[in-house]
Amino acid sequence: MWSSKNLASPALLISVFVISTSGLIYQLVCGTLASYVLGDSVAQFSLVIGLYLFAMGIGSYLSKFVEEDLLSRFVQIELGLALVGGLSGPLLFRVYAAYGAFRVALYLNVLLIGTLVGLEIPLLLRLLKFSLDLKDLVARVLSLDYVGALLASILFPTLLLPRLGVHQTSISFGALNAVVAVVATFLFPLPRPVLFRLRASGAFVLVILAVVSLSVNTLVRSAESLYFGAPIVYVNQSPYQRVVITESAKSTKLFLNGNLQFSSDDEYRYHEALVHPVMARYSGTPRRVLVLGGGDGLAVRELLKYPSIERIDLVDLDAAVTEFFGQHPLGKRLNGGSLADARVRVHNEDAFRWLEETSEPAYDVAIVDFPDPSNYGVGKLYTDAFYQRLRRQLGLRGVAVIQATSPGFARKTFWSIVTTVESAGFSANPFHVYVPSFGDWGFILIGTPGLDGGSLEPPRKLKLEASELRFLDDVVLRQLFEFPKDQTRVDGEINRLNDQKLVPLYTSEWGEWSR
């Protein structure tokens, strides 16, 4: 005949598994939000994990002062973890959107979660010590702890983040912690008033989490609308980033992980400067074009103005972006339906790997339009190794253009990219354009010396009539390649794949402006 005592040891061991899994999930939620908001994902995850482990040490030390009512204390701590961890996603985002004190809230949240988890494991060991010998007890608890961490690290990027998003993920695991706390009250005899209080507390926490879960989309939309300054018309949490489209009476804007990518009222300046100077630089008749990044199809829209083009390959990692701009009426209105053109092929792949593995023939022109190198995942696309791969994919006269951040806000970063491009064997013609939504923005026109028409001089005349464009003409084209004294060249280090010095440089320069 079985009783709750027969189930106590297995149930508490399962609790260890749940606690370790949820603890790591909360770390990943916090780290993901920090990388979205603060950039430099390596630094943010390092800080979050370090603080979490440090806080676990604090919690483990504090556990020695818990001497009585171990089960009650465990349930209370588990409910505290359910509440703090479960609400971490929505609350941190709300703090960022409404108040701006994100770092303080983030680090306090991580410290509190780590302390609570650090308190729980020793208490569980003490609760289990009467049913298992010490050697078996330590082996089981630690093995379940590590297996739970492994499961969390697999589930979060492959299933939880793309399916639930950061907010629902944290709420779901908060509810799981609350259920573990309530189940624990059935394992050992406790005074009836204590049982009632603990179970009522568990029910209260579950109700709070349920209410937040039902309203989290509205809360997040409200916070995002406040942050982005316009109504949100589209949101998608892909495995790679959070995609947000806002629309007001004046403009439509695309944000990736909270960073503005374009505004419809002035994006034509950016995309005309991105596409038409490099097309003018190509010495022949361009037929094959490669677009790396640019999943919104706006650069492709400009390219399709050239009747000689027979094939455009667009390589963009995130299908959430290319599908919206290829299928949604709003996206198609912005890019003129460019991604549906029969000459366009969309490849949802990592550009670095695609260049390494592709069997496509050489291209006449390449448009490289990646986000700024704010983290190491994007930073690899600004390395000498990447540009060497790009060079192999261009024909003998092939030319390319690279989006290279602002020479005004991040002067050293801009010229470091120029240096890196040159180290890969290209000649470089840097230029810049003023885009009201971004400020002064920089690009680099590149080609192979002696092969791309034999000239290192920037283009002087467009291949299209000025009447076909809203911003560029031949006079403006020549002005793009002139820099004021405070933006002229400075020494820059080569950005290599094994060190990626560009990412901390970019973060430091833009951080100075944000402060």
Image (tube, helix red, strand yellow):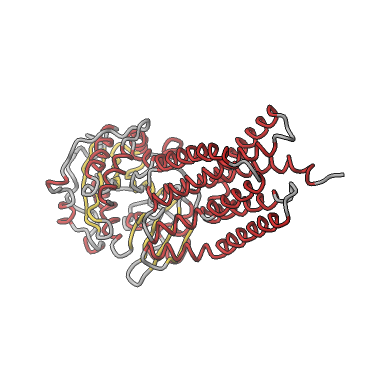
Q: Report the front residue among 194 and 353.
A: 194
Quadrant of the image for the N terminus? Answer: top right
Residue pictured at 51% horizontal, 43% vertical: 114
One can see residue 335 in this view: no
Image spot of residue 29 (x, y percent) = 50, 48
The image quadrant that residue 509 belongs to is top left
Relative to 315, residue 323 above or below:
below
Residue pictured at 21% horizontal, 42% vertical: 429
Image spot of residue 89 (x, y percent) = 49, 54
Locate residue 273 relative to residue 49 in the image: left or right.
left
Q: Report the front residue among 333 and 107.
A: 107
Image spot of residue 264 (x, y percent) = 33, 63
The image quadrant that residue 263 belongs to is bottom left
Q: Residue furthest top?
A: 135
Q: Residue furthest right?
A: 1
Locate residue 43 relative to residue 189 in the image: left or right.
left
One can see residue 129 in this view: yes
The image quadrant that residue 339 belongs to is bottom left
Q: Report the front residue among 515 and 57.
A: 57
Image spot of residue 8 (x, y percent) = 74, 43
Q: Report the front residue among 431 and 336.
A: 431
